[in-house]
Amino acid sequence: MSKFKELLTPKRIPSALLIVLAILLLALPVFGKDYYLYAVIRILILALFAFSVNLLLGYTGLLSFGQGAFYAAGAFTCARILLARPNLLLGIICGVVIAGAVAFILGWFSVRHTAMYFAMLTLAFGMMIFGFLQKLKITGGAMGLWGIPRAPLEIPYLFSISMKSMSSYYYFVLILSSIAIFIFYRLVHSPLGLTFQGIRDSESRIAFTGISVRNTRWLCFVIAGMYAGLAGALLAPLEGAVSPQVSHWATSGDPVMATLLGGMYTFSGPIAGAAIYFMLKEYAVGVAGEAMNWMLILGAVMVALVLGLRGGIVGSLQQSLFPRLRARFAERSSHEQNDIKH
Amino acid sequence: MELFVFQLLNGFSSAMFIWLVAAGLTIAFGVLGILNVAQGCLYMLGMFIAYTFYWNLGMNFALSVILTLISVGICGFLLERLFLRRVYALPLEFQLILTFAFVYILQDAVRLGWAPVLLQIPLKPHLLGGNITIPIISRAYPIYNLFIITAGIAVFAIVWLILDKTWWGKTVRATASDREMANAIGINIRTLFSAAFVLAAMVTAIGGALAMPFTESTCQVGAIVIPTTFVVTAVGTLGNLKGAFIAALLIGVVGSFATFYFPYLELFTMYAILAIVLIVRPQGIFGGG
């Protein structure tokens, strides 16, 4: 037991939790029902979507209400590809690339502004895509696309894995989103990520160092768009149908809320926020029944968060709970050392 | 020519609704410094409250509009006093998210209070119903559309008079340009903020009340109207009343012609205008610099 205590130093708590979480997630298909797998997939998709928002909001200081545009670009591209050529990897790669391309174009307009204007513009552009999708024939108009196959994961002449069962798709999403989250972690800790945070904190100082603030923001916008596209591309084969509703600004609001709920200045905030937001929504829908009054409950929670718990859940834990735990650990270990001395 | 004037009038009448929401948004932003995402929901609230007074309770149209103004004004007062007041000092994101939360809350409140589906369009009030023959277009045109255009222009004139010519308007403008200084010379900013937001809510509610016998009332209206309003305020420079008015007319008229000539590109034209304005003049057509 004492050896275990030695191993579990306060610094190692997060990694220990991570390992426990990873084991639980990997073992989930063994004992979980399909619904739980579906729920975790949806949470992971929402988390990727929230990462896209948080890269802009938490790291670069730009609030986007239009990430649904890139989510939709990813979802519809992936759906279209899968309907034409059932190859999961191809669909997802194309979804991410097209979403990045859309973000590249819209980003050029959007990053000319910051703060309020940026939020308004992204909202307007998101609704523009919504308007397009309502009329566009290739995406099925207002009805959207359906009957999207959950195509096998296949590299021609090498291998082909069926994705028919929920558990195989679950593992696929789990692995892919872990990679994406790892890349995100490396990104925000890279010099580029630090530049993003520098722009958030002091735009003019970054400009003084000779970095183009606008181009860096543009790059950030494109990367964020690609993350939203990945989330959308993973959604299409899961649901088997996509409607233009995915680009509506109400959809764009979901990841913003998840980010805020979890804590926007933290790395893991969006993941925790996505899990809590999803469960809250499921619970609220369950309580409200078919009356769909979950928005009322959600809105009230958001108001409470803004007025009371601004760091979000992860942020507040880091600020209050972890230091307290750390202090207690430190106290205990110093006691133990005293015991040894005596 | 006939068709041109006909489409122009249609464009003007639909522009007035956008203008009234945009006016509320502009006043709230100019004075309080808050971009109220839920402004469209106040419009929706105006619509439904007016519906209840006018259609369910069978009141006189003018009376029901006035009662709607008072009710939405009270809602605006409570919103400012209880919630917005607490976030003035916070970063922009929190202000936006708070007002965004009220989009959810108000939308569901309306769904609970009135109807989950759309309400039927009530009959227009006696005097304003029916058509009138206009010489230029030589065909019957609904009187109500002309009434809306008149009302929109009247509201513009009244708001302009209040803000530009009265003492109170001067204090509002002083506060908008320098909050601290205004506070220092003895303007009661807390009261002024409440009053300004109530004015903003009322102006928007007029739009909702007048739209009630014109379009279907649904709980989606708030979410539908706000992106258009954002485009209008961005084109006409955020915080500029005159700019918002002109931009609303522009967007309304172009939208009306686009719906007629290229029905597929109706939404696209609006955003095309936005894109062009942002490339040429990123600060909007009425921005300085």
Image (cartoon, rainbow, N blue to C red):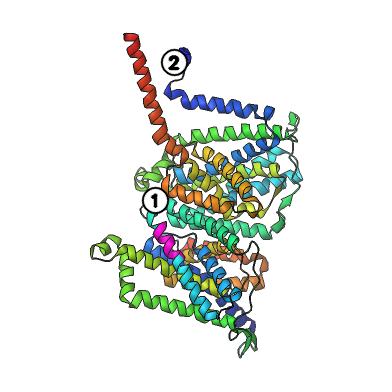
Task: Tell me the kind of residue under disc 2.
Answer: Glu
Q: Nearer the viewer, residue A229 or A304?
A: A304
Q: Is residue B62 left or right of residue A138?
A: left
Measure how far apart labels 1 and 2 are at the Cα level. Answer: 43 Å
Residue that numbered label 2 is attached to: A6
Task: Tell me which residue sits at (39%, 22%) in the image.
Answer: A329
Counting from the top left corner in percent of width and height, residue B233 is at 47, 65
Q: Nearer the viewer, residue B142 or B6?
A: B142
Q: Is residue A293 magenta?
A: no
Counting from the top left corner in percent of width and height, residue B227 is at 54, 61
Provide the major secondary structure of the magenta segment. Answer: helix
Residue that numbered label 1 is attached to: B91
Q: What segment carries the magenta color?
A: B75-82
Mark 1 or mark 2: which is in front?
Answer: 2
Element class at badge 2: helix
Q: Chain of mark 1?
A: B
In the rendered view, tell whether residue A241 sits above or below residue A342: below
Element class at badge 1: loop
Q: Is residue B176 left or right of residue A216?
A: left
Crowd around label 2: few <14 · some 14–19 · many ≥20 (10 Å):
few
Task: Tell me the kind of residue under disc 1.
Answer: Pro
In the rendered view, tell whether residue A1 sits above or below residue A24: above
Q: Chain of mark 2?
A: A
